[in-house]
Image (tube, coloured by chain):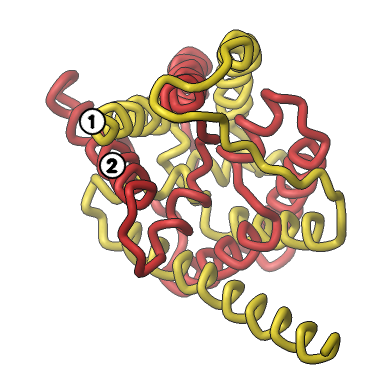
Chain colours: A yellow, B red
């Protein structure tokens, strides 16, 4: 049952991505190209999503717990540091080069277009590179502390 | 490559994305972040958590086909860049979202919807990064 609800929720998300145009790199890149072939459509995507999510979250958090779990899993950190800023900047630069963000690319895999698989492969490589670097860093810190 | 201005379709799609985010929190108590879903799948331990992430991914990937079956038209995906740019962009996105702790869905929709300051700053920075990157690739370097 849990897996079925997750699958359906994924389908709703993916359909939203597909209808909205976030699935289309040409449209995403044009959103950021104010000096050229500007297409402001994608502002309506985040606007529409927040229009539902802001009041929706309020209603959900009034409940004690989610339907299938004992509690809500929310990010504990509120730290605003260079990792957050430089990481987000790097993401933005990559997004502006490729036109795909992770939420746009994962549903796009379903189209079977080979370049989407190339992007997601590179995305996974990037995630693993960062994971490796973080591991080495934390090991060094641990060695330094002991 | 020009694309048509589609405020209604984009708004409608956005409403669905927001609905999915609210449903995932209401039913499973999680943030809908594409980065977190994918990153959690890159684990060798197969747990119930892994199964939920895999189900979300399968649901997402089924969307283009579902749309094709329902409307007779699949989504438009136009890729106006070369393979080198796809790989470079992909690696940068992967490293960036890992350090930044989220992407357009996790920070941009879910984090902002609960007024997380961290997410608001991340969103401003990655949007600025993308504007800058498109300006440089298209108008300074003259396209990839």
Q: Say which chain tag 1 marks.
A: A
Q: Residue placed at 68% from the left, 33% from the top?
A: B111
Residue A52 drawn at (x, y percent):
56, 13
Q: Nearer the viewer, residue B103 or A5?
A: A5
Report, in whole angstroms, how far the alpha carbon at label 1 lies from the one at label 2: 7 Å
Q: Residue placed at 55% from the left, 64% from the top?
A: B94
User: Which secondary structure, mark 1?
Assistant: helix
Q: Nearer the viewer, residue B58 or A35?
A: B58
Residue B48 drawn at (x, y percent):
33, 47
Within the image, what quadrant is residue A137 found in?
Answer: bottom right
Name the quarter where the N terminus of chain A is drawn: top left
One can see residue B4 in this view: no
Q: Which residue is mark 1?
A: A4
Residue A115 drawn at (x, y percent):
33, 62
* Number of numbered discs visible in the structure rendering: 2
- In the displayed structure, A4 sits above or below A81; it is above
Within the image, what quadrant is residue A45 found in?
Answer: top right
Of the numbered discs in the image, which one, if any, rests on residue B55?
A: 2
Q: Residue placed at 26% from the left, 62% from the top?
A: A114
Disc 2 crowd rating (10 Å Cα; few below 14, some 14-19, many 20+) is many
Residue A27 drawn at (x, y percent):
50, 39
One can see residue B32 in this view: yes
User: Which secondary structure, mark 2?
Assistant: helix
Q: Say which chain tag 2 marks.
A: B
| Mark 1 vs 2: CB contact within 8 A | yes
Disc 1 crowd rating (10 Å Cα; few below 14, some 14-19, many 20+) is few
């Amino acid at each position: 049952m849990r897996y079925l609800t997750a699958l359906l929720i994924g389908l709703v998300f993916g359909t939203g991505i597909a209808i909205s145009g976030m699935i289309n790199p040409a449209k995403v890149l044009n959103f950021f190209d104010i000096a050229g072939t500007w297409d402001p459509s994608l502002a309506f995507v985040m606007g529409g999503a927040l229009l539902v999510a802001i009041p929706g979250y309020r209603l959900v958090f009034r409940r004690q717990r989610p339907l299938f779990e004992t509690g809500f899993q929310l990010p504990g950190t509120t730290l605003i540091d260079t990792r957050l800023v430089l990481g987000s900047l790097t993401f933005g630069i990559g997004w502006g080069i490729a036109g795909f963000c992770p939420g746009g690319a994962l549903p796009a895999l379903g189209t079977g277009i080979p370049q989407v698989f190339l992007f997601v492969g590179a995305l996974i490589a990037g995630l693993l590179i960062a994971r490796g670097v973080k591991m080495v860093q934390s090991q060094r810190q641990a060695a330094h502390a002991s | 490559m020009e694309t048509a201005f589609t405020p209604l379709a984009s708004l409608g799609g956005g409403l669905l994305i927001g609905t999915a985010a609210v449903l995932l929190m209401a039913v499973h108590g999680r943030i809908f972040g594409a980065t977190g879903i994918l990153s959690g799948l890159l684990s060798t331990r197969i747990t119930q958590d892994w199964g939920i992430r895999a189900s979300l991914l399968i649901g997402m990937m089924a969307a283009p086909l579902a749309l094709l079956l329902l409307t007779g038209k699949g989504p438009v995906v136009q890729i106006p860049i070369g393979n080198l740019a796809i790989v470079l962009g992909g690696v940068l996105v992967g490293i960036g979202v890992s350090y930044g702790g989220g992407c357009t869905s996790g920070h941009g929709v879910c984090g902002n919807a609960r007024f997380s300051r961290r997410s608001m700053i991340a969103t401003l920075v990655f949007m600025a990064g993308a504007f800058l990157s498109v300006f440089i690739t298209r108008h300074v370097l003259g396209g990839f």
